Image (cartoon, rainbow, N blue to C red):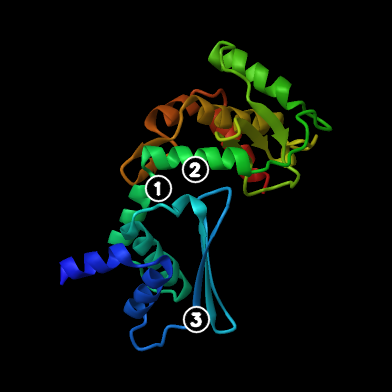
Amino acid sequence: MIASLASALFFESTEEVFRRVHREIKPRTAVPPLTVEYKAFANADSHVRLEHGRIEVKITDLLHEAPAHVTEALAHILLGKLYRKTVEPQYDHRYRLYLNRKDVRKRIDESRRTRGRKHLLPPQGEVHDLVEVFEALNQAHFGGMMVRPSLGWSHVRSRTRLGHFDPSHGMIIISRIFDDPKAPKLTLDYVMFHEMLHLHYPVLHTGTRRCVHSKDFKAHEKQFPEFEEAKKLLKKMW
């Protein structure tokens, strides 16, 4: 039985994989018309929706050559999400393990770099200049040795995403909420320092795990002068 399933899996089209998984998830429901399309997304994103009685699946073309068992895992994840079903850990593990492969991560980074667009405001804001902020922190904490990435203010005054380092584009983006005379300068310095640490300590990948804030990262972050005060001020801003 296992051998025949493996053989069938090998010869199935992507649509057939999704239809089979649909029957496994909803055995008492007829499989509705289902289409699968590979799209040139900037990230390794895939989507599914049920509309007018049809299931439409859009998969990143980065997975076009993925092994059949990975496609099967993605089908369980997407259809499970669509029908609000609990996805068995083995499928999530299998999918994450594939995405964390070094060669796959390289393709994803290349895709983000070539397809992804970053619409930023210049680093010279109305109140603060991000280049000056970066260089002051660079001299104080990194001996001036950190190569400056692209810097820019976000278009939106986001209160949820204060800063972001994008390794694919070599870019630090800071929320425009800090380009305000009412925002304590210490908070801007701290957020910039945090993003600089992401540049200094790359994300660690082990198996299915992705560690963004390593022990070294956290230890270095606590060396920031007035670390606790900066975090308190950030909480008070909301």
The answer to whether mark 2 and mark 1 are in CB contact below 8 A is yes
- Residue 30's place in the image compared with 112, above or below, is below
Spatial CA span between label 2 and label 3 = 30 Å
**Circle 3 SS class:** loop
Q: Position of residue 211 (x, y in %)?
A: 40, 39
Q: Mark 3 = which residue? A: 33
Spatial CA span between label 2 and label 1 = 9 Å
> In which image quadrant can residue 147 be found?
top right
Q: How crowded is the residue under tag 2: few (<14 C-alpha within 10 Å), some, or many (20+)?
A: some
Q: Amino acid at mark 2?
A: Ile
Q: Mark 2 = which residue? A: 108
**Circle 1 SS class:** helix
Viewed as shown, does residue 156 lie left or right of 68? right
- Residue 23's place in the image compared with 81, above or below, is below
Q: Mark 1 = which residue? A: 99
Q: Position of residue 90 (x, y in %)?
A: 28, 60
Q: Amino acid at mark 3?
A: Pro
Q: Amino acid at mark 1?
A: Leu
Q: Position of residue 162 (x, y in %)?
A: 64, 42
Q: Position of residue 196 (x, y in %)?
A: 56, 27
Q: How many marks?
A: 3
The answer to whether mark 1 and mark 3 are in CB contact below 8 A is no
Q: Residue at x 72, y 33 (%)?
A: 152
Q: Residue at x 72, y 27 (%)?
A: 130
